[in-house]
C-alpha cells in the first residue's frame, strides 16, 4: 500500500469518455474503496476541447495534445477512447512503450493489431485491458480469458451488435422491411446516424475476432472472417424461417473442430428453442461452449454510454488494485506459453460449412423441384426439408429448403448454376442455419 | 518468467477433486500454454487413500496427512476440496498462514469465515480464490468482483441450486408432488442421496452470502439471511401462480436500498417474462443489476464434477500466471479501501418486504373475503388481485391473493390472526413474489 494515488489520462472525450469522467467524479469514494487508493483524472486529450460533454472538467485538465498524456511520467493508466483504428493503435502502442498500462474500448485496433499490442505490453511489462471492446459492460472478455480458462472452447455464438438485433427483432414482430425497421431504430437511438459498420457486420467481425483470438490461442484477424450484413434481409424470409421453427439473428460464430477454426458473421437462423433466440431488441448475449462447463451464456446491454464506461472503469479498478500492490506486471498476454505458430489452422470461407436455408423464386411449373434438387445433389448438398408456398406473385412462387450441413464452396457452385436456370426468376436467398 | 513449475497440493479427493486431477493430467500441455509454466500436482491428501477415484495417481502423491501438503515449502497453491465447513476453514487458514495461495470450492467456509479468511490472506500476501463456490463453472464471482466492479449493484437474483430448480421444473411441467419430483431427481442424478441442504435452502444461503458480501462490500453472514426451502411446495400453488402469469423458483435474493441490504432465500414467484423464469431443470443463472450496466445475466450448469473442476482449474491458471510473474500478491480482499464498519446495515427478516402470494383455505360461505381483507388492511397489506377458485374439496375452497409490497412483520401478524379464524381451515400458504 505504498502508492498514494492512481493517475489516469484519458484520450478521446466522446460519449463513452464523458461517461468515464462522470463515473470517476460521481463515484470517487466508492472507487477508492474498491482500489484502496484514490483515482485522479489528471488529463483529458481530445482534438475538440470546446464542445460541452455535460461533465465539468477542472481547468488545465483538458488538452488537444495527446502527447501531454502519453509523455506525462505521473500518469499510470492511459484510457484510449478515440474510436479510430489507426489513431487508437498508435496511441496504445506509444503509451505501452512508455510503460503505461492501457485500457481501451477500441475493438478495431485490438482486433487489427493483436500481436503488435500484446508484444508491446509484454516487452514493457504493462497491463493491457479491453473489456469494453466486446459487449460493453457484459464481462465477456474476462470470462473467456480467465473464468473459463480451463476449458477447451469449441464454440462461441454471439449476438454482439445491438443495432442489428433491434432491427431484426422489429422486423420479426411487425413484418416491417429492413429500411422501415432501420428508421425506427435511428429514431429510438438504437442506430447511429451512419449505421453502416453495424448493419454490414463489421462491428460484429471485430468483436468475434477478439473473442476467438482469446478463446483459441490463435490470432484470428478480421481478414480471416467471412462477413455478411443484414441489409438484404427480406421480412418474408423471417416469416418463412418461423414456420420451420427458426429465429433470425445476426450471429458472430466461432467454431473449433480438430485442428482448425472457422469464424464468420452472418444472418443466421437459430432454432426458436436456442437460448439466443429469445435475446431481443438492443440486448446482446454471448453463448460459449466449454468442454468442462458445457454452455455458458452472458447476457446484457452490449452498448450505450454508461454500459461501455462500466467496463472501462471496472478495468481501471482491477488495474488500480494491482498497481497499488506493485503487481500490475502480472497481467500477461493470453496463452503466454504457446509457441509462435502452434495455433490452429484458420479456415477460409470456401472451407466453412453449415446447414442452410434457401429460398428459390421459381416459375410455377412441373419439374422445377427436380431440377433444383438434382443440382444440389450433384454438389453434395442434401435436403432436410422443403416447403413450397402458395404465395404466387407475378407467376413466381417461393420454394424454401433447409439443407443438411454442406460446404460453402459447394453451396456457392450449386446456387451459381441454379440461378442461371430459366425457371429461376430471382437470385436465390441464402441464409445460414446453426443449431 | 523465472519460475519453472507451479506446484499444487490438493486436499479432499472426492468427486470434484478427482475432476481436478483428471484435468491437470489430461490438459497438462494446454494449461502450461495458458500459464507459461507447467503445473505439477505434487500431493493429494484425503483421509481415504484406498478407494479408486477413476484417475491414476503416481505413487507417493497420495497421503492421509494434510500437513504434508500444508507444510511442504515447495507447494505454491493449496486446493481445498474437503466440503466440510470446519475442517475446510482450518485448512484454508493454515495454508494461508504459511503464505500459500488457496483455491477452494468450500462455500460454507467462505461464507461463514469471510473476514477471518480475507484477513489471513492479506496478512500473508496470499491469493484466495473461490470461483467454484457459487455456480460452479459459471464465472460469477469474478464478474461481480471485477467485471462489474464499477457498478453500484442494487439487486442480485440467483437460481443457484440445480437440485431444487430441477424439482420445481418437474413439478411445474407434470403437476408432480414435491416427493415425486425429488425421487425422480435422485434417479437422474440431480439430487444427492441426502439432499437436505439443497432443498432446505442452505446451499443457496451460503452462495448468496458470498455474492452479496462481494457486491455490497458489507459482510453478509449466513445468519443474516432469511431462508426457506421448497419442501412444502404444493403443485396446486405452482398451477395457481401460473394463472397469474408467474413461475415458481427457489430464488436467492439480495437487494440494496438506501443504506441497507436485505438478503433472503425462498420459493419465489417471478413473472413468466422474467429472464430467470425460463431457466429450467438443473441449470443455474444469476441476474445482477448494476447502476451502469443495467441487468446482466450469467447462465450455465451450476453443479457437476467437471463444471466445478473447471472453476478450480481456471483459478489455478489465473493464479499461476501471476505466480510466474512474481505478481500473485496483487490479489487483494474485495473493497480493500473500505473502512471497518463503513458497510451497509443488514435488515433482519421482520424488516424485509416484498409482494406476496397467499392461498387461504376457507369455508365456502358469505363474508369470508371481507373478514380476511379486513385483517390484511389493518396490517397495512393491500391486495392487488384476488381469485376465488371453484375447486371445492371437503367444503374448503381456495382463495388466492396477490398483495402489493408489504413488510414481512406485518404479513406474519396478519396471517397469525387470519389462521385463527373459524372460517380458515388450513394454514395459509405464503409465497413471496419478485418482479
Image: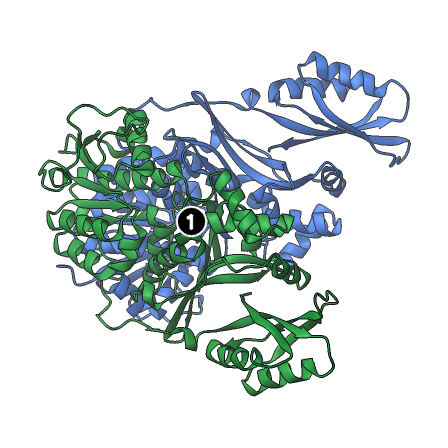
Chain colours: A blue, B green
So how many labels did they put on this image? 1
- The quarter in which the C terminus of chain B is drawn is bottom right
Q: Does residue A310 appear to the left or right of B66 in the view shown?
A: right
Residue drawn at 74 percent across, 50 percent down:
A176
Counting from the top left corner in percent of width and height, residue B152 is at 39, 65
Q: Nearer the viewer, residue A204 or B307?
A: B307
Q: Nearer the viewer, residue A415 or A80?
A: A415
Q: Is residue B138 above or below residue A32?
A: above
Q: Position of residue B22 (x, y in %)?
A: 31, 29
Task: Decide which of B305, A134 is in the foreground and name it.
Answer: B305
Compared across the picture, whether A148 is left or right of B31 comes to right
Q: Secondary structure at mark 1?
A: loop
B20 to A24, vertically: above or below:
above
Q: Which residue corresponds to the image point at 43% horizontal and 54% vertical from the top-left?
A: A137
A188 left or right of A26 in image: right
Q: Examine the image and state in which quarter residue B257 appears.
A: bottom left
Point out the image quarter for the N terminus of chain B.
Answer: top left
Pick out the residue farthest to the bottom: B378
Query: Residue B65 sits in which quadrant?
Result: top left
Asked whether the viewer can see residue A279, the reply is no
Residue closest to the far front: B394
Q: Which residue is mark 1?
A: B195
- Foreground residue among B222 and A169: B222
Residue A127 position in % (x across, y down): 26, 45
Which corner quadrant of the image does residue B114 belong to?
A: bottom left
Chain of the residue under the numbered disc 1 shown in the image: B
Relative to A70, is A256 above or below?
above
Assess disc 1: are there few (<14), some (14-19) or many (≥20) residues with their C-alpha within 10 Å of its C-alpha. Answer: some
Residue B138 visible in the current orientation: yes
Amino acid at each position: 500500500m505504498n502508492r498514494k494515488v492512481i493517475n489516469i489520462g484519458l484520450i478521446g472525450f466522446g460519449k463513452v469518455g464523458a461517461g468515464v469522467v462522470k463515473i470517476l467524479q460521481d463515484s470517487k469514494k466508492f472507487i477508492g474503496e474498491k482500489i484502496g487508493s484514490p483515482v485522479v483524472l489528471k488529463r483529458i486529450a481530445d482534438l475538440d476541447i470546446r464542445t460541452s460533454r455535460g461533465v465539468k472538467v477542472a481547468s488545465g485538465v483538458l488538452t488537444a495534445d495527446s502527447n501531454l498524456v502519453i509523455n506525462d511520467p505521473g500518469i499510470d493508466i492511459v484510457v484510449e477512447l478515440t474510436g479510430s483504428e489507426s489513431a487508437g493503435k498508435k496511441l496504445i502502442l506509444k503509451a505501452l512503450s512508455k510503460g503505461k498500462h492501457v485500457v481501451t474500448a477500441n475493438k478495431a485496433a485490438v482486433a487489427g493489431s493483436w500481436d503488435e499490442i500484446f508484444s508491446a505490453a509484454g516487452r514493457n511489462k504493462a497491463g493491457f485491458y479491453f473489456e469494453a471492446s466486446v459487449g460493453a459492460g457484459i464481462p465477456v472478455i474476462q470470462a473467456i480469458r480467465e473464468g473459463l480458462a480451463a476449458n477447451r472452447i469449441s464454440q462461441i455464438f454471439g449476438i454482439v451488435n445491438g443495432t442489428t438485433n433491434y432491427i431484426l427483432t422489429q422486423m420479426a414482430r411487425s413484418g416491417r422491411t429492413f429500411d422501415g425497421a432501420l428508421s425506427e431504430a435511428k429514431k429510438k437511438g438504437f442506430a447511429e446516424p451512419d449505421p453502416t459498420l453495424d448493419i454490414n457486420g463489421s462491428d460484429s467481425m471485430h468483436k468475434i475476432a477478439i473473442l476467438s483470438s482469446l478463446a483459441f490461442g490463435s490470432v484470428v484477424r478480421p481478414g480471416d472472417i467471412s462477413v455478411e450484413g443484414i441489409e438484404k434481409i427480406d421480412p418474408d424470409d423471417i416469416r418463412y424461417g418461423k414456420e420451420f421453427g427458426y429465429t433470425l439473428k445476426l450471429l458472430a460464430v466461432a467454431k473449433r473442430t480438430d485442428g482448425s477454426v472457422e469464424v464468420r458473421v452472418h444472418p443466421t437462423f437459430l432454432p426458436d428453442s436456442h437460448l439466443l433466440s429469445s435475446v431481443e431488441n438492443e440486448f446482446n448475449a454471448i453463448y460459449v461452449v466449454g468442454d468442462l462447463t458445457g454452455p455458458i451464456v452472458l447476457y446484457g446491454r452490449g452498448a450505450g454510454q454508461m454500459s461501455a464506461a462500466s467496463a472501462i472503469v471496472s478495468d481501471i479498478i482491477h488495474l488500480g488494485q494491482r498497481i497499488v500492490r506493485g503487481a500490475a506486471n502480472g497481467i500477461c498476454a493470453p496463452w503466454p506459453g504457446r509457441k509462435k505458430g502452434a495455433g490452429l489452422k484458420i479456415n477460409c470461407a470456401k472451407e466453412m460449412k453449415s446447414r442452410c436455408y434457401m429460398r428459390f423464386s421459381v416459375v410455377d411449373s412441373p419439374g422445377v423441384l427436380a431440377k433444383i434438387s438434382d443440382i444440389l445433389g450433384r454438389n453434395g448438398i442434401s435436403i432436410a426439408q422443403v416447403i413450397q408456398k402458395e404465395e404466387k406473385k407475378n407467376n413466381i412462387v417461393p420454394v424454401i429448403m433447409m439443407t443438411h450441413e454442406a460446404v460453402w464452396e459447394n453451396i456457392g457452385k450449386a446456387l451459381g448454376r441454379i440461378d442461371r436456370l430459366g425457371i429461376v426468376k430471382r437470385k436465390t436467398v441464402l441464409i445460414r442455419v446453426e443449431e
